Amino acid sequence: DTGVSQDPRHKITKRGQNVTFRCDPISEHNRLYWYRQTLGQGPEFLTYFQNEAQLEKSRLLSDRFSAERPKGSFSTLEIQRTEQGDSAMYLCASSIRSTSHTEAFFGQGTRLTVV
Amino acid sequence: DAKTTQPNSMESNEEEPVHLPCNHSTISGTDYIHWYRQLPSQGPEYVIHGLTSNVNNRMASLAIAEDRKSSTLILHRATLRDAAVYYCILNSLGLDKLVFGAGTILRVKS
């Protein structure tokens, strides 16, 4: 297993188009997180899953955003009717749910540019 | 979510120790102190974590104040590859989610 992988690495889209990103977590990890990061800022939490259940969504996740993790493995993040303000790096992370500390592993992200 | 305060940026010379401070005066008894770093064009990566006692691993050391209201990440010999944004994060048992602040930009001079 080579870690968390995200696809595509870069996406340029026209305003108003829909885009979908994919995240493949580390195989035994039951938790999966999505973050968004803009230039000069730390990553902002969007949502997370435990197995296939979406347990929390940030207020940042507008109605145009939807995330799924259908079989508790890979996840997709879809943005409908993209806006220029959606331009950002979208990061995925995975971890193992535990009552003690567990490390989150991040992918390299998908950089979205909306023109 | 408990908040942390870090300096915006710090600078270090190569092969010298670096002490990155973090204040977390509102820390609760169940909050772990985590440090992650983000190299340019990469996702964040775990560095170290602790609860009450000082911790060492191959990457760094974490010194935690006795009252737990502050901590310091120590890189014993900075290299150019340590230039990154360092995030200090509080997180309760179970790692529901990591809440990142702006972090400290560490610049390392050769």
Image (cartoon, coloured by chain):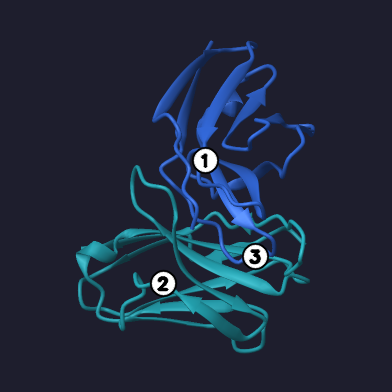
Front tag of 3 and 1: 1
Residue in the image at 44% along x and 54% along y: A43
* Disc 1 to disc 2: CB gap under 8 Å: no
Relative placement, left or right, of A24 versus B61 is left
The label on residue A58 is: 2
Name the secondary structure under disc 2: loop
The three-letter amino acid code for the residue at tag 3 is Ser
Q: Where's residue B13, x and y in %? A: 55, 10
* Disc 2 to disc 3: CB gap under 8 Å: no
Name the secondary structure under disc 3: strand
Which residue is under mark 1? B24
Q: Quadrant of the C terminus of chain B?
A: top right
Which residue in the rendered view is the most extreme toward the front? Answer: B67
The three-letter amino acid code for the residue at tag 1 is His
Asked whether A31 or A82 is in front, the reply is A31
Residue in the image at 77% along x and 36% along y: B53
What's the colour of chain B in the image? blue
What's the colour of chain A in the image? cyan
The three-letter amino acid code for the residue at tag 2 is Ser
The label on residue A94 is: 3
Give the mark, 2 or 3, whose residue is nearer the N terminus: 2
Relative placement, left or right, of A98 versus A110 is right
* Disc 3 to disc 1: CB gap under 8 Å: no
